[in-house]
Image (cartoon, rainbow, N blue to C red):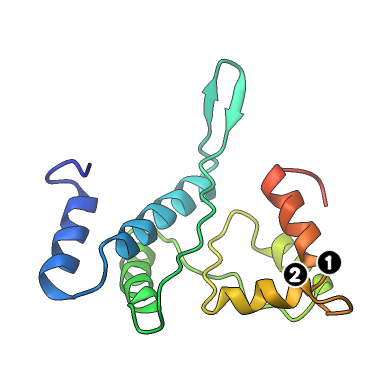
């Protein structure tokens, strides 16, 4: 699946050799960082007149201690140095703050540890983040907020 001698091949080999982290975690982190780089530079595909943006929406579910944050932080450090890509979407406490941060950090990478807790808070009626669910759906669909 991974072409030999590519940057991805090198990343997977290092993680395989040096850690016991499931290789799916650095694979997804790598692809997400590349997607962020492409989005940052306005890259799109035109497929028979339909514009496709390389926005990757992923949630990595793994037990605590599996290496999600470690893998992401190691790859994000290199991506920041080499590609100028950073995880700079801040944590938000409410829907208004989410919209403001989305406006300020459009086409950026949102890495959130304990994302399931954020999703859970969106499901609670009366929660300050309850409206974020609607905004995330609109963002995913490319609709205007």
Using a 10 Å C-alpha cutoff, classify the residue at mark 1 as few (fewer than 14 neighbours), some (14 to 19) or many (20 or more): some
Determine whether label 2 and label 1 are within 8 Å by CB.
yes
Which sits in the foreground, 107 or 93?
93
Q: Is residue 19 above or below residue 16?
A: below
The outermost residue toward the top is: 48
| Image quarter (top left, top right, bottom left or bottom right) of the N terminus | top left
Q: CA distance from mark 2 to mark 1?
A: 9 Å
Task: Examine the image and state in which quarter residue 94 appears.
Answer: bottom right
Tell me residue 27's x, y (percent). 31, 57
**Does residue 50 appear left or right of residue 87 in this picture?**
right
Query: Residue 43: percent from the left, percent from the top?
Result: 50, 38
Does residue 106 appear left or right of residue 67 in this picture?
right
Please give the name of the residue rendered at 41% of the width and 72% of the height, measured from the top-left corner: 62
Q: Position of residue 63 (x, y in %)?
A: 40, 78
Q: Is residue 84 above or below residue 127?
A: above
Q: Which of the 4 image quarters holds residue 77?
A: bottom left
In the rendered image, the residue lying farthest to the bottom is: 65
Q: Is residue 15 above or below residue 32?
A: below
Q: Which mark is residue 102?
A: none
Q: Residues within 10 Å of mark 2 (few under 14, many from 20)?
A: many
Nearer the camera: disc 2 or disc 1: 1
Answer with left or right where residue 74 lies relative to residue 99: left
Residue at label 2? 98
Mark toward the start of the polypeptide (2 vs 1):
2
Identify the residue shown where x is 81% and y is 46%: 144
- Residue 22, image x, y percentages: 26, 67
79 w.r.t. 117: above or below: above
Direction from residue 29 to residue 53 in the image, left or right? right
Q: Label 2's element?
A: helix
- Kindly state the secondary structure of the residue where label 1 is placed: loop
Q: Which residue is mark 1?
A: 131
């Amino acid at each position: 699946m991974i072409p030999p001698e590519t940057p991805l091949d090198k990343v997977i080999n290092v993680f395989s050799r040096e850690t016991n982290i499931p290789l799916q975690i650095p694979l997804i982190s790598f692809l997400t960082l590349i997607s962020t780089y492409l989005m940052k530079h306005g890259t799109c595909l035109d497929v028979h007149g339909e514009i496709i943006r390389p926005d990757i929406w992923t949630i990595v579910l793994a037990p605590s201690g599996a290496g999600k944050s470690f893998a992401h932080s190691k790859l994000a450090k290199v991506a920041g140095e080499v590609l100028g890509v950073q995880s700079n979407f801040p944590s938000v406490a409410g829907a208004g703050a989410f919209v403001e941060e989305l406006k300020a950090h459009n086409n950026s990478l949102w890495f959130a540890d304990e994302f399931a807790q954020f999703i859970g808070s969106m499901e609670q009626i009366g929660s300050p983040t309850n409206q974020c669910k609607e905004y995330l759906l609109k963002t995913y669909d490319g609709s205007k907020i």
